[in-house]
Image: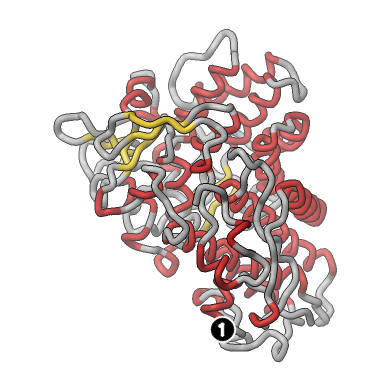
Amino acid sequence: MKKIILLATVLSSLISTVSCSDDFTDPQLQQTDVIDETPITTLGQLETFMNGTYALMRSQYYYGCNYVVFGEVRGSDEMFSTGSSGRYQTVSQFTMNATDSYASDTWKRIYRVISNANIVINATITDGTPEEKIDEIKSQAYAIRAWAYFDLIKLFGQKYTQDKNLGVPLILENTTNPATFAVSRATLDECYAQIESDFQQAYEKSVYNIDVKQKLTKGAIAGLMSRYYLYKEEYNNVYKYASEVTAQYAPIDKGLYVTSWRIEGLNSIFELAYGVAGAIGTSSVGYIFSSEGYANTRLNPSLVAAYDPEDIRAKIKKDSKDKTGMLRQNSSKNATYIEGKYPVLTGESNQKLVRYEEIALNQAEAILMGGGGSTAEALELVNGIRAQRGITPLTTITMDDVKEERRKELVGEGFRVWDLLRWNKTLTRIDLTGEQDITFPVGDFRLAFPIPQSEIDNNAGMNKDQQNKGY
């Protein structure tokens, strides 16, 4: 059995233990067990660690809150942070340093997700379980490892800074010995190669099951691949995988749109399960976004004004108990909050992380950028969404139309900053009062997060020269 590998900052807190999440701990694989002494050999153990991998993703330091907020408040034209309750000030104002907890907490959490995925990928099952069942589980681990590394390079990689070279350390094997730990940052190209290899493994081992929403099946994996290739501007691959997904799924019906965010299995291809046991309370993204919570993050007034009056996505809630609207305004109507996508303040509702609408918009963009298909096809995809939002169809379509539709449809889901960067747009900081001030063009060092100082101090394979320049 291969040993478990964790990043140095994770090892410092776990040393020789592994995590399979409090929610999913198997009685024969407690969190204090060393994996060399209790190897994973059965299907039940493999499923335990796979479930634990999903559970780790819902942390406030990853998709439970931080990663979504990061994609909305760093110079976005969708949302901005007011700094309420002291949260996200350094992130939104581009004033982070190497000891910033937002960088270090998210770095550690994503590598814990990767560690669990590695355990599943590297396990040898000897209880007679059919290979196709093992492949089904391992496909999910490969997909999550690819997804996690993709998320890491978006935050910490140098694609949009002047350096344009370094990615993040690639951890694929297992060890529990921090004394011998030394892993340098891989190049971006090396990271891309690993992400693509993992996605391909996931895709080949998976199967379609459109009724399963809380596990990564082939539809969700293909959707994630279209997201990744859009970031890389490989439009032929975007079209290839997105068109496969849109042939299997459809946009959520207008009559179900508002309530779908509360209902398990609706309006998603993949959703992260929470429930009462997994809810993260006041640490959830819903609490950050809601006027009833921290009221930390508001919609940009220009976005609110851009919605058609009949657009279901912009329907205003009358009060906190109103379940027929998506947005909430204060009494003077000068502050607007998105509450409908995260309807339970304590974070108990499932989180829709891969939706048809995103994938359809990926496909439409790929078409207009020459990746395949026809303009008529792109128009049909976008109008299919608009019809279910209660607004008139377009008669022609341009890239500006797709960009604006992404802004209206995907707001609050953590995409906008990455969209603006790949479109080579300058990010414009919005200060804590809601006023635009400083701009950050592509090439500015602050477009990448700092590598956590604790990682540089504890990982023998890294030194200060591997810090992102400027920090």
View extreme (front): residue: 465
Given residues 289 and 310, the one toward you in this image is: 289
Who's the residue at 53% across and 74% down the image? 21
Q: Is residue 397 visible?
A: yes
Q: Position of residue 176 (x, y in %)?
A: 67, 81
In screen coordinates, is 189 left or right of 99? Answer: right
Who's the residue at 45% across and 37% down the image? 256
Q: Position of residue 248 (x, y in %)?
A: 69, 38
View extreme (top): residue: 395
Q: Position of residue 282 (x, y in %)?
A: 31, 60
Q: Position of residue 393 (x, y in %)?
A: 52, 14
Q: Is residue 293 above or below residue 332?
A: below
Q: Is residue 248 visible?
A: no
In screen coordinates, is 399 left or right of 280? Answer: right
Few, some or many residues within 10 Å of mark 1 (<14, 14–19, 20+)? some
Q: How many marks?
A: 1
Given residues 465 and 219, the one toward you in this image is: 465
Q: Please name the residue that numbered disc 1 is placed on.
A: 31
Who's the residue at 68% across and 84% down the image? 35
View extreme (left): residue: 331
* Residue 120, quarter of the rendered image: bottom right
Given residues 127 and 62, the one toward you in this image is: 62
Q: Is residue 131 above or below residue 262?
A: below
Which kind of residue does numbered mark 1 sit on?
Answer: Gln
The N terminus sits in image quarter: bottom right
Q: Is residue 83 above or below residue 184?
A: above
